Amino acid sequence: MGYENIIAETTEGGAGLIRLNRPKALNALNGALMKELADALRAFEADDSTGCMVLTGSPKAFAAGADISEMAGLEYPGVYVDDFLSGWEALSACRKPVIAAVSGFALGGGCELAMMCDIIIAARTAKFGQPEIRLGIIPGAGGTQRLARAIGKARAMDMILTGRMMDAGEALQAGLVSRVVEEDALLDEALKAARTIAGFGRAAVLAAKEAVNAGMDMPLSAGLRFERRLFHALFATRDQKEGMAAFLEKRKADFSGG
Ligand code: DAK
């Protein structure tokens, strides 16, 4: 695929891989990169052979935030009227799961991008932060909302108001990331998880992601009802028949996606 700021490839086992590729600028997220990222995600969403995506950066940086050189000269009427950076929703709109494999800096929009993913796996070198306050702004791609939900109000306030960074160990302990691995094992670990997910029944995977995310926005009683509806609906799939038959026959399930 002809991208200039990212590298997108289909890997074995149904895992789509997207690498942010502006390493000299620590993968600063400019408009061109974000457009390519949205295009690549949409292509993987539309590709039946892809069941899960991995989003990663380079060793020194997952992404050090939105591109400050692109933002510095902007004025209010322009950013408001043009809805500056509105294209960032492509990642959170994905129905297939996306795993962030984070090495090095994940700052500002980089941290927000990781938090839009469904699972964050971090290398020991990972550093997370929302340093926007140092630039005279606040997080604008969900940082004040997703970070507070992920690690709680007290820790999120600490991060957002002081602009300090959190290392991988603290991020694991706080619940921002689900695993911490050695840097040289990061991509393998993320792709392995992606292949595991891609090997399950597609409808069950989409429903699981949808149920967890919907529940974050609902009272518990509504979330439980929503979950029950999706649970019942999965009995209309061939993959439910196959999964349960395979268990009873003591063999590996062969999910067809139907
Ligand atoms: N933008 C542009 N260039 C960046 C950059 C960034 N965010 N981060 C790093 N770079 C560039 C540096 O300018 C430098 O370029 P050259 O000077 O070599 O040309 C190169 O990357 C290497 O960086 P350093 O020389 O600074 O490297 P160090 O190891 O010394 O320091 C650092 C690494 C990550 C601590 C430092 O680079 C840094 O503090 N970077 C800025 C981090 C930051 O403030 N990030 C937040 C940006 S604001 C929204 C969507 C998104 C956003 C908002 C709204 N909507 C949907 C509405 C997001 C906003 C942000 O992310």
Image (cartoon, rainbow, N blue to C red):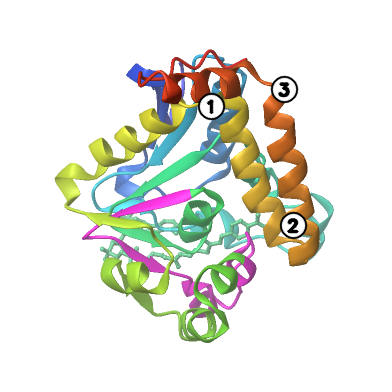
Residue 115 within the segment the image draws in magenta = no
Q: Amino acid at mark 1?
A: Ala
Q: Amino acid at mark 3?
A: Ala
In the picture, measured across the screen, residue 57 lies left or right of residue 36, that is: left
View extreme (front): residue? 248
Q: Which residue is mark 2?
A: 223
Helix, strand, or loop for circle 3? helix
Q: Which residue is mark 3?
A: 236
Q: Residue at x 74, y 46 (%)?
A: 228
Whether ligand 1 has any atom under 8 Å from the Cβ at mark 1 is answered as: no
Tag nearer the camera, 2 or 3: 3
In the picture, measured across the screen, residue 142 lies left or right of residue 103, that is: right
The range drawn in magenta is 119-145
Q: Position of residue 11 (x, y in %)?
A: 35, 20
Q: Residue at x 36, y 20 (%)?
A: 252
Tag nearer the camera, 3 or 1: 3
